[in-house]
Amino acid sequence: MTSTAPQRVAAARVGIGGPVGSGKTALVERLIPALQARGIDLAVITNDLVTAEDAERIRRSGLIDPARVSAVEAGACPHTVIREDPTLNIEAADALERQFPGVELILIESGGDNLASTFSRDLTDFWLFVIDVAGGDDIPRKRGPGPIRCDVLIINKTDLAPHVGVDLARMHAEALTVRGNRPVLLTNCRGGEGIEAVIAMIEKDVLFRA
């Protein structure tokens, strides 16, 4: 007899990469309540070198059930476990899906790395790369693989631009130019500005919600 039980749909997996201090964890902390408010069932994976620091920060935040936050310790160059051999992250995501069968979306935060950091498509369906204005307005011009190849480039800490001598409009325009006008979003994760645009893109391009 053929079973008519519906097939479980695998959760979408969204990578979040970027240099140390660019605001990746702050972005995750803003995305969690905004996604939950839209009824999206989610879980989180963080990557660190030899600690679970970011995972513990999110677990303590009260934003999400701590059991829904998994930590991967890279033990070496951070992009190794998101690109060359993403097995640890794939196993962590699979485990979360088994534990929470209704999960729709898994956010995978990379350990802090340089502009060469990219995600394997075996691991993620979509990935964001976060840079910040304090890192310098020349970052887009450096054309690193991370900022160039990501699905969405996020320029964070926009509130700091006047304090660090950055022409934000020019930085945004140059980022759009080097990315061939593919998406570049501006955020201030600390203040919550620009988060709605990130959410809208995830809903449209990842979860395929109208």
Image: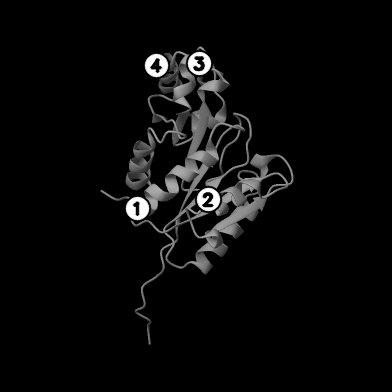
Report how far apart the C-alphas of labels 3 and 4 lie in the structure: 15 Å
Counting residues from the N terminus, which is met first, the one under dot 2 or under dot 3?
Answer: 2
> Would you name the residue on which mark 4 appears?
169
Q: Amino acid at mark 2?
A: Ser
Give x and y (percent) for residue 139. Answer: 54, 20
Comparing labels 3 and 4, the label whose residue is closer to the camera:
3
> Would you name the residue on which mark 3 appears?
163
Give the structural element (helix, strand or loop) at label 1: helix
> Would you name the residue on which mark 1 appears?
37
Give x and y (percent) for residue 8. Answer: 41, 68
Comparing labels 3 and 1, the label whose residue is closer to the camera:
3
Q: Are marks 3 and 4 in contact (CB under 8 Å)?
A: no
Counting residues from the N terminus, which is met first, the one under dot 3 or under dot 1?
Answer: 1
Crowd around label 3: few <14 · some 14–19 · many ≥20 (10 Å) = few
> Would you name the residue on which mark 2 appears?
61
Q: Residue at x 67, y 43 (%)?
A: 80
Judge by depth and name the residue closer to the eye, 49 or 33: 33
Counting residues from the N terminus, which is met first, the one under dot 4 or under dot 1?
Answer: 1
